[in-house]
């Protein structure tokens, strides 16, 4: 659960930066959010969840 909240905050910050600096329009951001909601309720959601969990695990194993 903590990973999900962290990912949401990370993506929120990324979208805000893209809107301010890269010219991402608010309409585009809304479309991206809606796509996320529709993907979350689709049959692809478990695969996306597994992929992000595995990537987070790999990043967590990196020793600096």
Image (cartoon, rainbow, N blue to C red):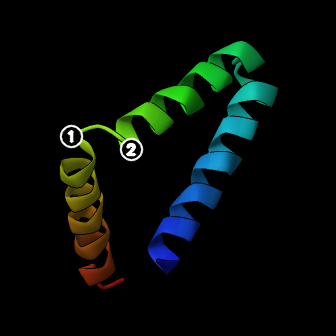
**Residue under numbered circle 2:** 40
The furthest residue to the right: 20
Q: Is residue 32 above or below residue 16?
A: above
Secondary structure beneath dot 1 equals loop
Whether residue 25 is visible, yes or no, is no
> In which quadrant of the rendered view does residue 6 lie?
bottom right
The residue that appears at 42% across and 32% down in the rendered structure is 38
Q: Is residue 35 above or below residue 28?
A: below
Q: CA distance from mark 1 to mark 2?
A: 8 Å
**Residue under numbered circle 1:** 43
Foreground of the two, 55 or 48: 48
Secondary structure beneath dot 2 equals helix
Specify few, some or many for label 1: CA neighbours under 10 Å numbering under 14, 14-19, or 20 or more: few
Q: Position of residue 2 (x, y in %)?
A: 51, 79
> In which quadrant of the rendered view does residue 58 lie?
bottom left
Q: Position of residue 47 (x, y in %)?
A: 18, 50
The residue that appears at 27% across and 67% down in the rendered structure is 53
Tag count: 2
Q: Would residue 51 be found to the left or right of residue 35 on screen?
A: left
Q: Is residue 24 above or below residue 52?
A: above
Q: Position of residue 62 (x, y in %)?
A: 27, 79
Q: Are marks 1 and 2 in contact (CB under 8 Å)?
A: no
Q: Would residue 10 be found to the left or right of residue 41 on screen?
A: right
Foreground of the two, 27 or 17: 27
Whether residue 37 is visible, yes or no, is yes
Q: Would residue 18 be found to the left or right of residue 10 on screen?
A: right
The residue that appears at 26% across and 49% down in the rendered structure is 48
């Amino acid at each position: 659960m903590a990973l999900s909240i962290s990912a949401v905050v990370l993506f929120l910050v990324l979208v805000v930066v893209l809107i301010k600096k890269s010219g991402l329009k608010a309409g585009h951001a809304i479309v991206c959010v809606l796509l996320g909601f529709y993907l979350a309720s689709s049959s692809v959601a478990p695969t996306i969840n597994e992929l992000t969990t595995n990537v987070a695990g790999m990043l967590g194993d990196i020793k600096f």
